[in-house]
Image: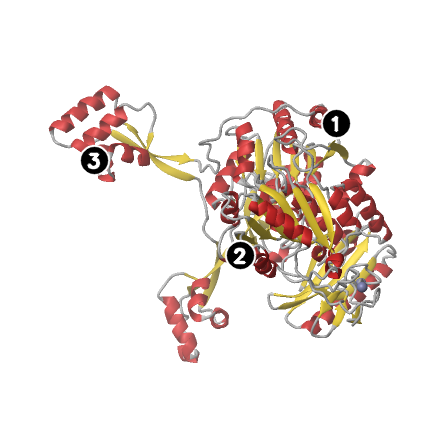
Amino acid sequence: MGYAEVSVNSPIAQRRTFSYAIPPGLSIDVGQAVSVPFGDKLLQGIVLELSDYPAVEETREIAAVIEPYPLLSPAQISLARWLSEYYLSPLFDAVALMLPPGFERKALTFISPLPIPADFDLSSLTPEQKQFLQLVQKQDKINLKELEKTLGKKKVQTIVSQLVRQGLLARSYQLEPIKIRAKKELYLSLAVKAGEAQQEAARLREKRALKQAVLLDFLSRQSEPVPWTEARQKVNSNKAVVDALDSKGLVAVQQIEVRREPISYLGIKPSHPLTLTTAQKSAFESIKSSLLQMTKGQTRPPVFLLHGVTGSGKTEVYLQALAEAVRLGKRGIALVPEIALTPQTIERFASRFPHKVAVLHSKLSLGEQFDEWQRIRKGEFDVVIGPRSALFAPQPELGLIVIDEEHEWTYKQHDKSPRYHTRDAAIKLAELTGAVVILGSATPDVETFYHAQRGDYRLLQLPERVTPNEGSPLPQVEVIDLKDELKAGNRSLFSGALSQVVAKAVASGEQVLLFLNRRGAATFIQCRSCGFVLRCKRCEVALTYHSAEEVLVCHQCNYSIPSPQVCPRCLSRRIKFLGIGTQKLEQEAGYTFPQARLLRWDSDTTKQKYSHQEILSKFRAHEADILIGTQMIAKGLDLPLVTLVGVVSADTGLNLPDFRAGERTFQLLSQVAGRAGRGTLGGQVIIQTYSPEHYVIQAAAKQDYTSFYDKEITYRRQLHNPPFARLARLIYSHTNDTLCQREAEKMKRLLIEESEAKGIDDLSLIGPAPAFIHRLRGRFRWQLILRGSDPSTFLSQIPIPPGWTVDIDPIGLS
Ligand SMILES: [Zn+2]
Ligand SMILES: [Zn+2]
């Protein structure tokens, strides 16, 4: 085959590949990294396909091969193509997810002086141009970036363009230098036989060359080469001593490749599989038989949903399923939400698969990531563990993919392209490789559970908690109606019941979590007398209060009304209650519980003072009695001294302008309730709310996923929201608000025209409206929501102008 289709690392390339001829003598494989000429640059690219004929008439040749082996497997290439097509992202962005860490290199621009033609009139140049030319002439080649840094980007670019046009300067391009390589260390060994070395050492001793004698002696007693850093410490030597022995031909110095290993196995003892409960065993057996069937060539791998309450032992099922996959000659990938990738999680896996667990995440040095990636590719690990990006590790013989806490929103990459959801990408990869997928959660994503109900996924249930004290029940949850508190004259943030139990817990040396459903102030208004919240008639989401204009706005469809002075339901004047933030909560907790030591944990405190780990270990060490925080404290913490969780206000998150607000609140409340009573002391949860009758609060209080799901799925069906339709969110951002609105309206007209022209009648457009976060980093944002059975395919056929961001299957609309 004489031609290659290459995905090129250039923003111009977008979703397509480019044809290149393979020069004679060069052997090229699919998945290989190459450098190719692109315009007047030389860029990196990945070969996605080989063919006998090019897709265009004129092709250029591949310039060079970057790595001798393919970086992407055929399955990964198909996955990258799918990610690019479905999420409408540039193809190379999708390919880049699977490349070795530090691989991507930008093209740098250099300029060099050319000989000045004899007939050139130098006096025709401006003083500025002349000065610049003199500066460049002092060197052969200058990095343009360096010049821009000292002289200013605009100015340099203008002058360079002028001088290039006059034939006085030339531009050239080069890839930036390689960022990381395999790490090498100096090793020492004897260059002569041990006996000879010892005689030599004795002779050196006589000559009073003691340090040389000691090192030689030491090396003559080693059976393998010794790292120089180790030898230096043990015999107190230095480099001059090594050089002296080296020059006498007694010692050999070599560079040996070493491994940067992110898991320290010191203190990790191998662990054995635990005895499974009946429910765990039955779940495990189903997975086991599917793994076996896949090795026998079944074509479509199953997706399991492991639905188990907090503490029901899902991880043990993952570990045993992974061991089973390994027994069948396969390997696994286990994904956890970023915040759950703690040393404890890694330890749990590492102790079950000693030295067979790779960790990949962004906190590792680039060198560590690079080494792990290379070793994974060589098949040295049974399991790769990491956050969403670990899905793209080059794990060979993939047989099992585990996604723990599958409902977590961090599985969606929402801030950069490709805006993929890890769950969907994992299921696609599993289809391509024949791997079994396990999705695990105590509060599954509504869409996932819907698929399990329909039989698209296979549902496995773990209904009981496996706790230290046998059969310990889930914590008691009590819902407090804040309207009653107000009627009784209590205006504080704490209901009578909550302040009583907090004081009692603190007095008995136990710990308390106080939880706000959302950081900062609420944005909706609520009637404190009857709990009423104003909602959009069309979208059902809570209207957002804009205090400056005294209006309520729907951030999905732009419906707006003046803010009412009295509650439309009960005519109370207490309609403008705006909720509370963590800071205010901390203040009031200080007054109400003067004897308690407080600790606040939200993104403000963690930004300024401590890291999450620091705050957490402080609290674990019982250096505080009450921990105050937002979402973050709900997630995966194991705090044995916590016996009480107080949800100070459950309503804030419930009234975000997003159809998933209910689902998210249910997940958070369930998780936060799961924090209580992890130890032997048992637990109690108090939820304060103005809407105690709300189905989300009711279900969370009973920790009853099914009753939540049944209501939620009914609303989703009625309003035609996912999983009954798919969404695409289009955002236009610009520093000028009016321009944003205009562009958004223009886009709406274009989309309507296109859908009419194509005869698509199941698409609906919501908006345009200012985004809930209307202004972000100085830019205004307007959004359009597209709802239908397949907005991705529809949008893929429409040229999207610059300035727009398209998010397929967005996880949040606020
Ligand atoms: Zn009211
Ligand atoms: Zn609306």
Kindly tell me whether residue 400 is visible in this rendering: yes
Residue 513 drawn above or below residue 572 = above
Kindly tell me whether residue 59 is visible in this rendering: no
Q: Which residue is mark 2?
A: 605
Side (left or right) of 220 relative to 471 = left
Q: Quadrant of residue 274?
A: top right
Indicate the amino acid at tag 2: Thr
Which disc number belongs to residue 529? none
Side (left or right) of 495 relative to 37 = right
Image x and y of residue 467, in percent: 63, 32
Image x and y of residue 461, in percent: 74, 32
Indicate the amino acid at tag 3: Ala
Q: Are marks 3 and 1 in contact (CB under 8 Å)?
A: no
Side (left or right) of 475 relative to 563 = left
Indicate the amino acid at tag 1: Gln
- Residue located 70% across and 55% down the image: 653
User: In this orientation, which residue lies closer to the viewer: 560 or 132?
Assistant: 560
**Is label 2's Cβ within 8 Å of ligand 1?**
no
For marks 3 and 1, the one nearer the N-term is 3
User: In this orientation, which residue lies closer to the viewer: 549 or 503?
Assistant: 503
Q: Which residue is mark 3?
A: 244
Distance from the alpha carbon under mark 2 to that under mark 1: 52 Å
Q: Which residue is mark 1?
A: 298
- Residue located 42% across and 77% down the image: 128
